[in-house]
């Protein structure tokens, strides 16, 4: 369980440390500079990662065991 919660650090690191490595205008993705596309992608990925954490967290199970 501890490992699945460690996934929550991934979006944090990607949005905090990632821009130092991907800060460029070219290539453009869907008309957005690469850095803006990076942030937009990680917002969506953050929601998906939080859904995975929620799904596998034993505190969110319906059964009382």
Image (cartoon, helix red, strand yellow):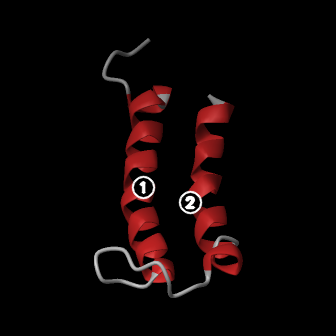
The residue closer to the viewer here, 63 or 48, is 48
**Is the C terminus in the top left, top right, bottom left or bottom right quadrant?**
top left
Seen at 51% across and 88% down, the residue is 25
The residue closer to the viewer here, 12 or 41, is 41
Q: Position of residue 61 (x, y in %)?
A: 37, 24
Seen at 28% across and 75% down, the residue is 30
Q: Position of residue 21 (x, y in %)?
A: 69, 74
Circle 1 sits on which residue? 45
- Quarter of the view holding residue 18: bottom right
At mark 1, the secondary structure is: helix
Seen at 38% across and 16% down, the residue is 64
The residue closer to the viewer here, 21 or 17, is 21
- Tell me how far mark 1 sits from mark 2, CA to CA: 8 Å
| Residue situated furthest front in the rendering | 27
Q: Position of residue 37 (x, y in %)?
A: 41, 75
At mark 2, the secondary structure is: helix
**Is the N terminus in the top left, top right, bottom left or bottom right quadrant?**
top right
Residue 21 located left or right of residue 65: right
Residue 10 located left or right of residue 54: right
10 Å crowding of disc 2: few (<14), some (14-19), many (20+): many
- Quarter of the view holding residue 31: bottom left
Circle 2 sits on which residue? 11
Is mark 1 in CB contact (under 8 Å) with mark 2?
A: yes
Disc count in the image?
A: 2
10 Å crowding of disc 1: few (<14), some (14-19), many (20+): some
Relative to 63, is 11 above or below?
Answer: below
Return the disc, 1 or 2, that comes first in the chain's sequence.
Answer: 2
Relative to 55, is 23 above or below?
Answer: below
Residue 62 is tagged as: none
Residue 6 located left or right of residue 25: right
Q: Position of residue 13 (x, y in %)?
A: 66, 64
């Amino acid at each position: 369980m501890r490992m699945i919660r460690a996934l929550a650090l991934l979006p944090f690191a990607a949005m905090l440390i990632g821009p130092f490595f991907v800060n460029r205008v070219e290539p453009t993705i869907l008309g957005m500079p690469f850095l803006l596309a990076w942030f937009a992608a990680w917002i969506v990925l953050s929601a998906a990662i939080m859904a995975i954490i929620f799904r596998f967290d034993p505190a969110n199970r319906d059964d009382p065991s």
